[in-house]
């Protein structure tokens, strides 16, 4: 749900903040008052094309901030895909900043994103329907999704998607196993050599570090022996060595402790120090004795380290990586050596999964075709109420790869959504042939068709559990859906907008009082002059009196009559029970 939009220095908007509510939100005002500017600004925040021309005259920068909120956010997977962190996933903040020099910046939750990323996010937040927008309803995939919602086939669709994913994995493995025989033999030879080479090396984790340390000792043997000998002599052998002098100190303290017992604890401390130095002296004596020149061992170590370094250049940066490579090479070699057996096994699995997939896909297709008949009837009835009594509406099916679909053991038939391609066809006027939606020229007719389909799907779709429900766009925007209609038809449009808004948020820009009277939150948009400059102002009509006055203006024009006010009050009263 779009909770709030804040616009600064955009076109004739100086500083505007609007808070929207769930349900049906209506924006009305005189023609040219700036109602559609809000929709355009929101489109910019959602990744629309930016131009410095939209920056308010005399200003250096413009910014649009849109805040969305949802208890079950459709954007969660998008946040994970693009690595956008946030403490509260239920809230999403979009910000677009434009500078007069032409620079533009997009941020989501205060983290910069690309325009492509924002455009991938937009369909998860808002669906805009108007006279010029390219509607998502025109896409075959969106039409198929609406039909599945209406049919209540989500569980079966999930099964088809799972089976398709399993089938694709098996198909990919079969392709690898069916590589050219010569290429397979070349890979077997290469992997055999690598596995043998690594087996013969008999590498041990940490071996290189231990060898480097031993090499350092052997290469600096004279210096090490001299340092150890000097330390040992000064501790134990030389006249006045540390151990001897500490012995003298110890005997003196023993004599002293006979007269003063407080010295005893120091005698014990000195004894500990002497024991430690005696241990060190013995270590140095034995260590010096062990040190002996061994050119052969040094050469052996250098050869071993050279081997390890060569293997690192070929297989990994560390011994652990080399061993992991070797283990993987052994697995690949085993698979290639047993390719015929695995190929037969994969072929059996693939055939079984393909049969299960086609069985589920055909069942899904049957449910869709039954639901399509009901959908056609209900949408035609809705169109009749929306002033398109003569319109015909049909759901056309195309089976993917029909010649292969008759052979259940043939992999590759269908896709993650099943074996159907669905397209909505309509003939708005008598004598016209049925055509796909994108062939329809009238934006108003297309918007009313969309409203009819959404209303039918929303009212007839079975209730979904929170676990199985798919996240859906939560805000629909209708920009002047009332173009070319009025009276009874406009009232029917208003009722259907109100019905659609029961479980989603709807924003509607309208000139028709028959639509505006159904609003749960009504905004009046007008242009004002302030300090010689034009600005757009928006007022939320909070009281019934304010709303009646605006409806009366929409009915009668600038001069509001008592008759118009009474009519407006009656409309509000009747719409309240819609």
Image (cartoon, helix red, strand yellow):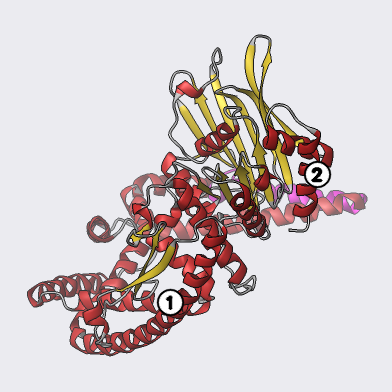
Q: Which residue is mark 1?
A: 162
Q: Which residue is mark 2?
A: 569
Which image quarter: residue 401? Answer: bottom left
- Where residue 511 appears, x then y in whole percent? 61, 38
- Where residue 462 appears, x then y in whole percent? 60, 74
Which-is-in-front pick, marks 1 and 2? 2
Q: Nearer the viewer, residue 119 or 251?
A: 119
Q: Residue at x 53, y 61 (%)?
A: 384
Q: Residue furthest top?
A: 532
Majority secondary structure of the magenta segment? helix
- Where residue 483 appears, x then y in whole percent? 52, 42
- Please state if 513 lies on the left or on the right of 450 as rendered: right
Quadrant containing the C terminus in the rendered view: bottom right
Q: Residue furthest front?
A: 563
Q: Residue at x 78, y 39 (%)?
A: 548
Magenta region: which residues? 235-260
Mark 2 lies on a secondary structure that is helix
Res 92 visible: no
Q: Nearer the viewer, residue 168 or 266?
A: 168
**Which comes sooner in the sequence, label 1 or label 2?**
1
- Where residue 490 appears, x then y in whole percent? 61, 49
Question: Magenta segment: does it hold 239?
Answer: yes
CA gap, disc 1 and disc 2 = 55 Å
């Amino acid at each position: 749900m779009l909770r709030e939009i804040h616009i600064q220095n955009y076109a004739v908007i100086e500083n505007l903040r609007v808070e929207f509510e769930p349900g049906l939100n209506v924006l009305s005002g005189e023609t040219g008052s700036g109602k559609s500017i809000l929709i355009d600004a929101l489109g910019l925040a959602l990744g629309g094309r930016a131009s410095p021309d939209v920056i308010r005259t005399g200003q250096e920068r413009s910014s649009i901030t849109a805040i969305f909120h949802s208890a079950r956010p459709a954007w969660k997977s998008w946040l994970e895909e693009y690595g956008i962190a946030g403490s509260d996933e239920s809230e999403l903040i979009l910000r677009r900043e434009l500078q007069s020099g032409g620079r533009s910046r997009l941020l989501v939750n205060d983290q910069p994103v690309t325009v492509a990323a924002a455009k991938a996010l937009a369909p998860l937040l808002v669906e805009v329907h108007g006279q010029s927008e390219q509607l998502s309803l025109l896409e075959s995939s969106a039409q198929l999704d609406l039909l599945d919602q209406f049919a209540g086939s989500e569980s079966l669709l999930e099964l088809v998607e799972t089976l398709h994913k399993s089938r694709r994995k098996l198909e990919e493995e079969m392709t690898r196993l069916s590589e050219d025989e010569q290429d397979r033999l070349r890979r077997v030879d290469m992997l055999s050599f690598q596995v043998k080479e690594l087996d013969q090396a008999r590498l041990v984790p940490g071996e290189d570090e231990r060898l480097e340390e031993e090499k350092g000792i052997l290469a600096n043997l004279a210096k090490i022996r001299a340092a150890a000998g000097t330390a040992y002599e000064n501790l134990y052998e030389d006249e006045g060595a540390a151990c001897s002098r500490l012995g003298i100190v110890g005997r003196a303290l023993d004599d002293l402790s006979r007269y003063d017992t407080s010295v005893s604890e120091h005698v014990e401390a000195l004894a500990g120090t002497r024991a430690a130095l005696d241990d060190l002296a013995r270590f140095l004596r034995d260590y010096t004795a062990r040190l002996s020149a061994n050119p052969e061992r040094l050469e052996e170590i250098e050869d071993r380290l050279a081997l390890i370094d060569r293997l690192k250049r070929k297989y990994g940066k560390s011994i652990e990586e080399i061993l992991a490579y070797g283990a993987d090479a052994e697995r690949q070699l085993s698979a290639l050596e047993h390719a015929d057996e695995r190929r037969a096994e994969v072929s059996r699995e693939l055939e079984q999964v393909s049969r299960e997939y086609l069985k589920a896909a055909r069942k899904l297709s049957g449910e869709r075709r039954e639901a399509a008949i009901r959908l056609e009837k209900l949408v035609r009835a809705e169109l009749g109420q929306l002033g398109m009594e003569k319109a015909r509406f049909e759901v056309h099916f195309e089976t993917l790869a029909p010649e292969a679909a008759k052979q259940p053991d043939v992999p590759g038939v269908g896709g993650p959504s099943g074996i159907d391609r669905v397209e909505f066809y309509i003939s708005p006027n008598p004598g016209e042939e049925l055509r796909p939606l994108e062939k329809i020229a009238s934006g108003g007719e297309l918007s009313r068709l969309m409203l009819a389909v959404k209303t039918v799907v929303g009212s007839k779709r079975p209730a979904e559990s929170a676990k199985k429900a798919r996240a859906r766009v939560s805000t629909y925007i209708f920009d002047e859906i009332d173009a070319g209609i009025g009276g009874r038809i406009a009232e029917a449009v208003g009722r259907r907008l109100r019905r659609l808004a029961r479980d989603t948020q709807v924003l509607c820009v309208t000139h028709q009082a028959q639509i505006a009277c159904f609003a749960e939150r009504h905004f009046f948009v007008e242009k004002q002059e302030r300090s010689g400059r034009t600005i757009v102002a928006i007022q939320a009509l909070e009281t019934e009196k304010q709303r009646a006055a605006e409806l009366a203006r929409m009915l009668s024009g600038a001069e509001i009559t008592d008759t118009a006010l009474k009519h407006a009050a009656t409309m509000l009263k009747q719409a309240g029970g819609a």
